[in-house]
Amino acid sequence: MASCPSCGTENPEGSKFCNECGTALSAPGETRRRLVTALFCDLVGSTELGERLDPEILRKVLDRYFDAMRAAIQRHGGTVEKFIGDAVVGAFGVPEAHEDDTLRAVRAAFEMREAATELDAEIDDLEVRIRVRIAIDCGESFADESSAMQGRIAGDVFNTAARLEAATEPGDVVVSAAAERMLRGRVDMEALGPIELKGKAEPVHAFRVLEIRSVPARVETPLVGRERHLRVLEEALEDAIQAQACVLVTVLAPPGVGKSRLAVAFAEVVGERATVLVGRPPPTGTASRSLRSSSCSRRPRGNPPEMPRLSRRRSANNWSRSPTARRWATALRSSWGWARRSQPTPPGPCVASSRSSP
């Protein structure tokens, strides 16, 4: 008999899929030690939801909640290890490992929190709240590398993440000291001090994640020997301003030689002469012009990064009616090669910086 890793149903030998839930059945993969990042997300006030909502409505709300949480984890390269009641357990680093798995977990956590905020706004007329607490820990685990074998990871990271989440305030994303070391220089954090957790012999040092840095700390270093390249970029900017046209400059060099640092230095040189937009594609997925540009335009009119997508859309819709927005749209179309020949780019300099790989 073959046991389903998802629902536990016993299936006849030779079955390729579970007869109960449809999960793919496969032979266990190689089991070995892996560095795993565990994400534990819990729905705050789920008991109140059950008391106040009709069972049918509750089921629909929870289905949307679970779908959004699963999508966020998978979009950033993680897997849903299991669901425990209304809690979602995610794993990063297995079956496929990445150099930034802990950062991916934080990105997923931020997206999960935003999705919960949007769902909360959409069901506001039900007079209930959708809020989440999320905790992240990383460390060695003994893991089955088969992607179909959820629930086959053994290690203390999931226990620590679960206990840490229980001690977290609603809306917070909190990481352990082990995760903090992996994230240092990439996110802004606030130390919460040692926390006594149930079942843990020693207090656990925890950190609240405040914001993911758009430019990692390693880029914030002195620029040496790039004066000539800066002059070339400055000349291109002056040409664009004089001609009232878009100019594309592509910096080509092997990884690690300082392309991003050069872009940061040029943005500082530009100063007040032009508006500077910085676009960075996410570490997952395929980089493209539209993807990089969407990250540039994600914060119209000074919207804070934590503003939910629904509010950003409303703000963007209002902003899009202004003459300034039409000028930006024309400039972007021109820079992408989409502008009509009869439609010149209106005045008003801007500099957009992006990179094609993380």
Image (tube, rainbow, N blue to C red):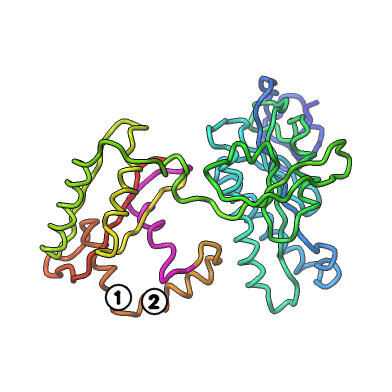
The answer to whether mark 2 and mark 1 are in CB contact below 8 A is yes
Specify the quadrant of the image occupied by residue 198. top right
In the rendered image, residue 112 lying in the magenta stretch gets the answer no
Does 336 sit left or right of 260 as displayed? Answer: left
* Picture quarter with the N terminus: top right
**Label 2: which secondary element:** helix
Place of residue 209 in the rendered image (x, y in percent of width and height, measured from the top left):
62, 51
Q: Is residue 197 above or below residue 46?
A: above
Q: Residue at x 20, y 49 (%)?
A: 233
Place of residue 56 in the rendered image (x, y in percent of width and height, measured from the top left):
77, 67
In the rendered image, residue 288 lying in the magenta stretch gets the answer yes
Which mark, residue 319? 2
Residue that carries the numbered disc 1 in the rendered image? 324
The amino acid type of the residue labelled 2 equals: Trp
The amino acid type of the residue labelled 1 equals: Thr
Q: Is residue 353 above or below residue 55?
A: above
**Label 1: which secondary element:** helix
Does 357 sit left or right of 224 as displayed? Answer: right
Tell me where the magenta segment starts and ends, as one range: 283-303
Q: Residue at x 68, y 48 (%)?
A: 207
Place of residue 17 in the rendered image (x, y in percent of width and height, measured from the top left):
69, 34
**Other residues around mark 1 within 10 Å, as few (<14) / some (14–19) / many (≥20):** few
**Other residues around mark 2 within 10 Å, as few (<14) / some (14–19) / many (≥20):** some
**Nearer-N-terminus badge (2/1):** 2
